Image (cartoon, rainbow, N blue to C red):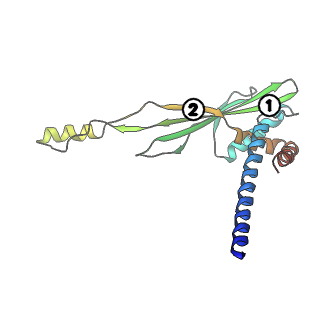
Amino acid sequence: MYRITRAAGLCLALAALALAGCSGSLRHNYMRDEASRHVYQKELAEIWPVVHQVLKERGLSWRENPGRFVLETEWRESGGGTLGPTTSSRFLVEGVRVASGVALRVTRLDRTQQAIGVGYTDGVVRNSREAAAASESSTASGKLPTENRSSRDLELELVLLQRIDPEGAAKLEADAKRAHP
């Protein structure tokens, strides 16, 4: 009897931990989704320096038209190597005026490229002319077509909300805890 009770207790503890993890994930997703709809009660000129600061802290550089509140970061390699695909990312950040204030939209563009080798030989070289041709062709390479994907970056939008409007972010967190205890 004691073994059954102990096993049941262990199962309940594990289930509680799993549910706590699920709740945390649900709260975070709730906060990201709500941050994507957040309207700031500030002027774009007031929040734009914070956008610059957050991007700079992440090691990103960018180009922008001053006064337009639109910027695009440079490509940044985020993975890959000589044998696997190379992935690079960049961000487009837009400050948008809406009827009741301003909003920030962050779009992330990911591109993946796969390098391929072409012109490999069978390894049999008969003379110096073939050796030179084999050496030249074995180093030739190409790339498969680039794959591009873009999506809203709700994680970065949440980070920006937390930095620009800490009170709004705290309210959002409280709402998330009520919605997903």
Query: Dot 1, crowdedness within 10 Å: few (<14), some or many (≥20)?
Result: many
Where is residue 43 shown, x and y percent of the image? 85, 31
Residue bearing mark 2 = 149
Q: Quadrant of the N terminus?
A: bottom right
Please tell me which residue is depicted at 20% across the width and 37% down the height of the picture.
133
Most foreground residue, 91 or 4: 4
Where is residue 169 shown, x and y percent of the image? 83, 44
Residue 91 appears left or right of 23: left
Please tell me which residue is depicted at 37% across the width and 38% down the height of the picture.
116
Spatial CA distance of label 2 from label 1 is 23 Å
Amino acid type for the residue under numbered disc 1: Ala
Per the image, label 2 sits on a secondary structure element best described as strand
Please tell me which residue is depicted at 41% across the width and 32% down the height of the picture.
144
Residue bearing mark 1 = 103
The correct choice, above or below, for 11 with respect to 3 in the image is: above
Per the image, label 1 sits on a secondary structure element best described as strand
Where is residue 23 shown, x and y percent of the image? 76, 51
Q: Residue furthest bottom?
A: 2
Quarter assignment of residue 39: top right
Task: Mark 2 or mark 1: name the one nearer the start of the chain.
Answer: 1
**Which label number is shown at residue 53?**
none
